[in-house]
Image: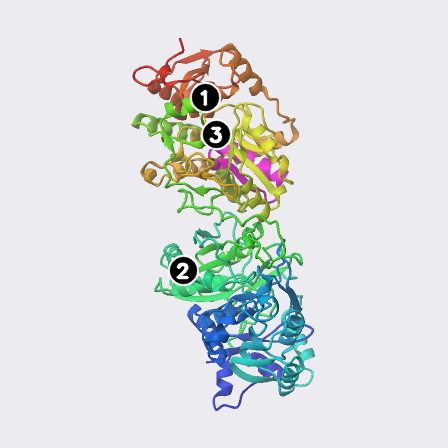
Amino acid sequence: MVWSGSWVAERLGVELVGDGRPDGDGELKDLLGLALRRNPKRAHLLVSNVLGKHVPQKPSVVYGTGFELGRRVRELLGDAEARRAVVLGYAETATGLGHAVADGLGVAPYLHSTRRPVEGVARAGGFEESHSHATSHLLLPEDPALLAGDRGPGGPDGADTDAPLVLVDDEFSTGNTVLNTIRALHERYPRSRYVIVALVDMRSPADRGRLAGFAAEIGARVDLVARGAGTVTLPEGVLAKGQALVAAHEPEPAGATAHGAAGSAGPAAPGFRPCTRVDLRWPAGVPDGGRHGFTPAHRAVLEPALPAMAARIAGALGDARRVLVLGFEELMYAPLRLGTALEDHTDAEVRYSTTTRSPVLAVNDPGYAIRTRLVFPAHDNPADGPGDRYAYNVAGAGFDAVVLAVDSAADTPELHAPDGLLAQLAAHTDHVLLAVVPSYVPSRPHPHAPERQEPPVLPEPLRGPAFSSYAPDEVGWLLQDLSDTELEAPTEEREEAIQSGGAHYAESLPVEYQPSAAYQELFKAALELSAARVARAVGTVTETVLAERGPRPVLVSLARAGTPVGVLMRRWARHRHGIDLPHYAVSIVRGRGIDANALRWLAAHHDPADVVFVDGWTGKGAITRELSAALDGFEGFDPEIAVLADPGGCVRTYGTREDFLIPSACLNSTVSGLISRTVLRADLVGPEDFHGAKFYRELADTDVSGHFLDTVAAHFDEVVDAVDTEVKELLAADRAPTWEGWAAVERISEEYGIHDVNLVKPGVGETTRVLLRRVPWKILAGRGAGADLDHIRLLAEQRGVPVEEVDGLPYSCVGLIHPKYTRGATGADGKAVESK
């Protein structure tokens, strides 16, 4: 085997010397390789083979190495001291290592430093890492008393000042970082014992003496536990030689070359689907890592959940035989534990590594530790601004599947961009899976913490196949799952309760309409007839949105009628432009407003100015007005709705203003991912919950959601020219809302003696809803309306509802809900009849 440090050693004269044991040199070289980096303070980089940062390694080896070091610390401290200890790891390289050490202790809480400030979380300390690429470390514990050693009785105010602090880093080279840390913390939280843990102790004799002197100076005991030990010998002028060598192999500074340099390819081809989402179902309340603290109680919840999460990943891997679990910068522990669990759930060869902020030269030589490098934009909106990030030894490593694990703060448009990490990975493996761990933000003030007002952290969006029949990357539902709750009520009971004021329509669900064989055939025929027309409207509205709200809008559909449209718009953007637009579905309820918690989640994960609300069609414009009013208290959101059809003249952004049949209006959940209409009821939806909905898994045999999407998308290519012409005309036209539909509804309400505009539902889509979900009184149809109303006529016939042809109707049809409805207003067979 060629040592992965020989390339640097031969050119610079750098040597690794063991600690004097017979095989000390060999053991050290098993642990470490060498690489070069563009750094004015230290040219060489010690590259660990067991850390899981730069070199993919078996997850069990990475975790086992840290866990064993933790066991050694527990033996050193004894059980009583270990119970009072606190473990502190260093960002970004040692966050996972430190967590594994804490697991080895078994009884100690864990915290790691971070370079990501978190709004509302008080800083409890910080220090500098002088030789690092990014030097400043923050300490942001949810409970600031954690660093004070509040682990038992004793000391002022009950603080246990003798609680040991265990500091974990990947290497102990000069000791400067540890000295800076202890000095900063000792001034605020003095204690009598520190334990330093590292994979390798590479200090010179002078550095060893300096640490001993510092320990004596502060009057504390400092112990060291390391997996390996030795020294690095550096010849005269090695820094200048190293910089020259880097310049010769990388003439431009890191990041100045195209993304994907050094053994990788450029962005994925347009239309390529770069990833498959895996719904981990991360346990609620468990932090994604130690940024704010991770306790043994958190560990007790996570451990039993790992096998099920690994099984979900394994189920999505197919026949992959060589798999990389790739973590993200400071997010090392969660993907590491997913990797160890995955090793138990698949026969595939599993490796683990993570992305990094640190630029390192890549040289494709077996004697060099960093063979290839992927370069991609930062994708977590870093506080220090945009910049390049890196993944090493992934390109060309023969992985036929990569499972990328990120926290939700990093699941951004930059991640999904054509030059983003997902596209870079897709160029080097057959299958990319994306697993998102919810970013933990402290939600409840600890008794010792400064007062904060942040609302509780909200759960991640629900995704298929766990919730809905849509693919997980097609839409994220900002809803809570009420599938196990009995919510359906007979249509007549619901109508009477709604009209009497005894209940709101969103407090229950209608019994799902089960279409007859004749109606199913009618739907199929309608879809074939109108698919190209729908595709044209999809293209027109999407291109308009991209032109006016681009380059990367965030689609937020109004569940549920807007959701199939949002999915189609997302498909158009990917098919035509090769971009993956984020898409979420939220609930809005007439008279109650939009889901405020869903808006809060969106604002925390995206720029509100990028959010584009999407719906299927407009009727009289009630939801348009509802949304505008609901957004008054939320800064940055644009209340404009983008719709396929705007026959009511209520919006500026539309595919057409014709009132035509959109086949997704013909059915309920079976054309909308098997999701119910949304529910808002006080006993089910608390002030900190998303609105609810049900997933009708039992209707899978009649689900046509995918068929509808695929049929429409199949016409995209043929309508491109027509779309381009229409968009050009629309962008130059006056598209101001006319509200023609609202005026017509008010007129009809008075002419027919209804006196309630909420009982007048204009347009094909709204009329279909009346027939499927309410108690209809009569249907007004535009004289001479053709095939667009075939399904309306069939439904009306099935429910005994008269269809009246009228002139001068601005819509194809209008559905009238039975006014002043009571169950006594129906005939003996339950069918609606006209009022006497």
Q: Distance between the residues labelled 2 and 3?
A: 47 Å
Mark before the other along the chain sequence, 2 or 1 = 2
According to the picture, the residue beneath numbered tag 1 turns out to be 499
Query: Residue 636: where, in percent of width, then height?
Result: 64, 40
Please tell me whether residue 562 belongs to the stretch shown in magenta.
yes
Q: Using the image, determine if residue 635 lies above or below residue 192.
A: above
Question: Is 721 in front, or is 5?
Answer: 5
**Which amino acid is tagged 2?**
Leu
Q: Tell me the quadrant of the picture where the C terminus can be found.
A: top left
Mark before the other along the chain sequence, 2 or 3 = 2
Say which of marks 2 and 3 sits in front: 2
According to the picture, the residue beneath numbered tag 3 turns out to be 533
Query: Residue 786: where, in percent of width, then height?
Result: 43, 18
**Which amino acid is tagged 3?**
Arg
- Mark 2 secondary-structure assignment: helix
Number of other residues with Cα within 10 Å of mark 2, as a class: few under 14, some 14 to 19, many 20 or more: many
Q: Using the image, determine if residue 1 lies above or below residue 494.
A: below
Q: How far apart are marks 1 and 3 (CA)?
A: 37 Å
Q: Residue at x 58, y 52 (%)?
A: 414
User: What segment carries the magenta color?
Assistant: 535-563
Query: Residue 330: where, in percent of width, then height?
Result: 55, 63
Colour scheme employed for the rendering of this structure: rainbow
Q: Which residue is drawn at 53% across and 45% down?
A: 582
Question: Is 597 in front, or is 535?
Answer: 597
Q: Which mark is residue 306?
A: 2
Question: Is 753 in front, or is 250?
Answer: 753
- Mark 3 secondary-structure assignment: helix
Q: Residue 631 carries which label?
A: none
Please tell me whether residue 277 belongs to the stretch shown in magenta.
no
